Amino acid sequence: AQRVTQPEKLLSVFKGAPVELKCNYSYSGSPELFWYVQYSRQRLQLLLRHISRESIKGFTADLNKGETSFHLKKPFAQEEDSAMYYCALRSSGGSNYKLTFGKGTLLTVNP
Amino acid sequence: DAGITQSPRHKVTETGTPVTLRCHQTENHRYMYWYRQDPGHGLRLIHYSYGVKDTDKGEVSDGYSVSRSKTEDFLLTLESATSSQTSVYFCAISGPGQGNTQQYFGPGTRLTVT
């Protein structure tokens, strides 16, 4: 069975500091990984996906198949980055579009 | 935001009463999902649909049923609400094809069962 682990429930950093939100997964095949973000009182929205290899709002994430990780990083955190972040995995192949989510990390960026 | 709405947005109900939540989309996407969001549990899939009248269970389907009689609507029913079903419920949609594995989420419904 596939599983996504976000080891930190809460993460607090100061504005301008680097931030890394950890995500580890277990899946025997070749997964597709996503990061979703939920700002206060808003709906979840896609932040980035590993197949796009893009940087959104200064965030990047690299899929490391050897370590089965997909950590989210930003070199200089901003107060507006404060939000709940979810890592999600979609198993490969077929028409399976279901996502498995981690439990989320609440990021607080202090002024 | 993708064209996804949920109704009602807030509901308070009593234990034992039936409750139906509605998800409506204007994107003509094939796949629709119902999740519940709880502190410490993240998002958990309740049921999903891969077409009209085609549905399947997710990881926390006990106590819930769904129906999809047309592409744009996906209904989630709690046959007899319990306090453990107090949660925020999110609907999501996704389309077919290699470029459309992303899920788009609705605004959520906050349900309180007293």
Image: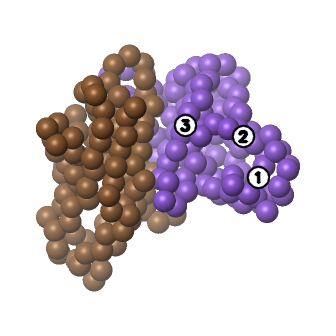
Chain colours: A brown, B purple
Q: Residues within 10 Å of mark 2 (few under 14, many from 20)?
A: few
Residue drawn at 21 percent across, 61 percent down: A20
CB contact under 8 Å: marks 3 and 1: no
Question: Could you give the CA–CA distance between mark 2 and mark 3, rounded to whole angstroms?
Answer: 12 Å
Location of mark 1 (residue): B82
| Marks 3 & 1 on one chain | yes
CB contact under 8 Å: marks 1 and 2: yes
Tell me which chain the residue with mark 1 is part of: B
Q: Amino acid at mark 3?
A: Glu
Location of mark 2 (residue): B63
Location of mark 3 (residue): B59
Asked if residue B29 shows in the view, the reply is yes
Question: Could you give the CA–CA distance between mark 1 and mark 2, rounded to whole angstroms?
Answer: 9 Å
Question: Could you give the CA–CA distance between mark 3 and mark 1, rounded to whole angstroms?
Answer: 18 Å
Any mark on residue A18, and which?
A: none
Instruction: Tell which of A67 and B93 is nearer to you.
Output: A67
Q: Position of residue B6 (x, y in %)?
A: 64, 46
| Marks 1 & 2 on one chain | yes
Tell me which chain the residue with mark 3 is part of: B
Residue drawn at 42 percent across, 53 percent down: A103
